[in-house]
Amino acid sequence: MTRNEPRTSTGGAVDATEVLLPGRVAPEGLVVRHRRLDPPGPGQVTLRMEATGVSFAEQQMRRGKYFDQPSFPFVPGYDLVGTVTEVGPGADPAMKGRRYAALTKVGAWASHVLLPAADLVPVPEGTDPGTAEALVVNGVTAYRMLHQLARVRSGDTVLVHGANGGVGSLLVQLARHAGATVIGTASARNAEAVRSLGATPLDYREPDLPGRVRALAPDGVKAVFDHVGGPGLVDSFGLLARGGTLVSYGTASTRDVVGNAMLPVLLLFARLLRWNTLPNGRGAHFFNLWNGHRRRADFRRRFARDLGTVLDLHAEGVLDPPVAARVPLSEVASAMTLAESGTVVGKVLLVPDQP
């Protein structure tokens, strides 16, 4: 059921709509509620959401499996794009009416969000907000993993698992732009979508998937980007050429495993650490968007720089993030179910309800 767009109240307060995650629930257990959002305080702005994403992080959060999620209940939402409607004391008044992107980790599944003005990154005029949203976390993640961790260059061959996904599809495009040859795994139904991005598709259910990769890259691959984890990570590491790099950035294989949320992550870290001690010239890393910054100001500066680069690449026609669906915020259960189905190409977005 759709609801009317919240109206601004007097004094800069807003009647907002948000999605509450009350505990470990099925998608139907997500609660759509309304509340009064206070005016922005010093250094803050009110951002009216135009698009926010349904990512693997929220899929884990609803199961209590995301390694540093807050205690229930809370409002999920890792990132968003929107327009500033109110500016608090000390924030630049010129921000009002302009479109920005923000990385939040939680809290973005709402019609309006209070955020520090310093956390916002400008979105170029004319950029579709949904397209920009699909580049915020996914684009920066793909860009950093490819260029700053794996350092992929022209002539390299790389393997991208989940090449039809939000991050995977951008990894393929960035690698091809860098001059690399890309092998991409996906389901058979998504093979043509992967091929259209410029990668050679392989069915991830292939009984001898490592053998198929070796047939395409007999000397091994320069990099493997693996969001699956689990036993298949051993195969990913074994496919590396000497001097190659494994970049692990998720544990999708353990999403539905009942038990301690930290255990799969700790086992993963232990495995990567051991591999880095082997005398074979190969490296193994876990990518976390939030690590490597001692100061908040450093994180903001680097994130704004990298997101700006990614948005520029989109403007130049290099990156075209696939959007699987745009679902009204009040229909969040359907959006979550679709995102978890494994049948989509690209990112599922939540957008404002129409009046």
Image (cartoon, grey):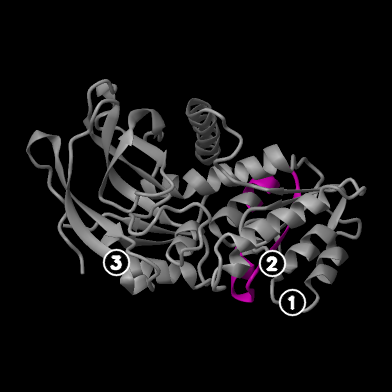
Of the 4 image quadrants, the one containing the C terminus is bottom left
Q: Residue lying furthest left in this view? A: 10
Q: Is residue 185 magenta?
A: yes
Of the 4 image quadrants, the one containing the N terminus is bottom left
Mark 2, Cα crowd under 10 Å, few <14 / some 14-19 / many 20+, is some
Q: Which residue is mark 1?
A: 206
Mark 1, Cα crowd under 10 Å, few <14 / some 14-19 / many 20+, is few
> Marks 2 and 3, Cα distance to the nearest angstrom?
32 Å
Q: Which residue is mark 2?
A: 230
Identify which amino acid the numbered label 3 is placed on. Answer: Glu
Mark 3, Cα crowd under 10 Å, few <14 / some 14-19 / many 20+, is some
Q: Residue at x 27, y 65 (%)?
A: 31
Specify which label sits upstream in the sequence, 3 or 1. Answer: 1
Q: Quadrant of residue 86?
A: top left
Residue 2 in the image: state x and y as whole percent. 20, 65
> Marks 3 and 1, Cα distance to the nearest angstrom?
35 Å
Residue 83 in the image: state x and y as whole percent. 29, 38
277 vs 171, left or right, is right
Q: Nearer the viewer, mark 1 or mark 2?
A: 2
Q: Quadrant of residue 330?
A: bottom left
Q: Which residue is mark 3?
A: 331
Q: Which mark is residue 14?
A: none
Specify which label sits upstream in the sequence, 1 or 2. Answer: 1
Q: Is residue 163 visible?
A: no
Q: Magenta span covers which residues?
A: 172-193
Residue 294 in the image: state x and y as whole percent. 56, 30
